[in-house]
Amino acid sequence: MPELSDIANEFIREEIEEFLELPEEIERNIRLFSRASSLMQNIAAALIDGDMSTVDSLTRQALDEGVEALEIMDDGLIAGMGIVGIKFREGYVFVPEVLISARAMKAGMAHIEPILAASGVEPIGTVIMGTVQGDLHDIGKNLCIMLLRGGGFKVIDLGVNTKPAEFIEAVREHGAHLIGMSALLTTTMPNMAKTVEAFVDEGLREAVRFMVGGAPVTPEFGKDVGADGYGKDALACVELAKKLAVEVC
Ligand code: B1M
């Protein structure tokens, strides 16, 4: 088991020591950061600190040095946002700080997106993606979209706060068969069920496949709302989309 002292970045060490209390979160983060390269640790530290220009330049530097886009995403950007999430939950930081870190994350993602999207092959199918009604969280959804595009899908991004009628309209307009719904709030998760029900009411349910995901969503919840599959992360979302595409695209 790695120790806190195995993490090279002093700022990350202090963040873990000062703000993390749950033993499993401490252990997970020590494991994650101790195996991450120092450049990835520096990206995560800058993201936690809300330092957009450093996240921007270090992400560019990492790509120029040949680091895989997925490694930067997982060990730098998502790892940093994980710490921000814990600090937010525990009341150490508030919405403005989280937004500043989210902006830094987007600056890093802007370099990664074109690389993940550059597959240049005929699309496997069209996916309609949206964060459900009432929910404004879009970072996870956007990561899924990047990887879906990189995985050969055409993706129509409906953004956040997506009403059931908007999903239906997009499916009709684009002739799509795959729908991805993201939710980050326990209060908006039921809107996944409402969206599926709206498709049933329109007589469109059989023609499409629903994927669901987001931090509070579980495979069981996915089944309960009538979805066809659940993705635990952006890679799983792409695998699921490929599996469901075989059925409907
Ligand atoms: Co909010 N927020 N937030 N927030 N926020 C959470 C979700 C929360 C858990 C924080 C906490 O208390 N610990 C909490 C929810 C509690 C709950 O519901 N039980 C919360 C709250 C309470 C709120 C507000 C209500 C706060 C307030 O105003 N008092 C408010 C709600 C606004 C609204 O939506 N109506 C709010 C606002 C915000 C910000 C605007 C400040 C900002 C969002 C910025 C943005 O997205 N543009 C924000 C953020 C950033 C977070 C945290 C810190 C980080 C979320 C995130 O981006 N994670 C979050 C805490 C946390 O989750 N640790 C929190 C990184 C992202 C990569 O992960 O989205 O899970 P995630 O996506 C993953 C997987 O889940 C999966 O793939 C992704 C990559 O691996 N995935 C899918 C996602 N969608 C998928 C779809 C798929 C498949 C996989 O198939 C279709």
Image (spheres, rainbow, N blue to C red):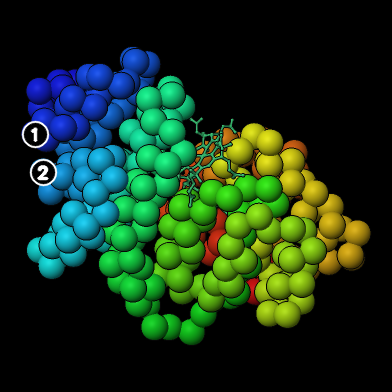
Q: How many marks?
A: 2
Residue 184, picture quadrant? top right
For label 1, being within 8 Å of ligand 1 is answered no
x, y percentage for residue 17? Answer: 22, 19
Crowd around label 1: few <14 · some 14–19 · many ≥20 (10 Å): some
Residue 176 relative to residue 205: left or right: left
Q: Which residue is mark 1?
A: 8
Amino acid type, mark 2 = Ser
Q: Is residue 219 above or below residue 23?
A: below
Q: What's the CA distance linking mark 2 and mark 1?
A: 6 Å
Tell me the residue at 68%/36% (across/down). Answer: 187
What secondary structure is marked by label 1? loop
Tag on residue 170? none
Residue 44, picture quadrant? top left
What secondary structure is marked by label 2? helix
Residue 218 relative to residue 102: left or right: right
Q: Are marks 2 and 1 in contact (CB under 8 Å)?
A: yes
Q: Quadrant of the C terminus?
A: bottom right
Residue 177 relative to residue 42: left or right: right
Tag on residue 38? 2
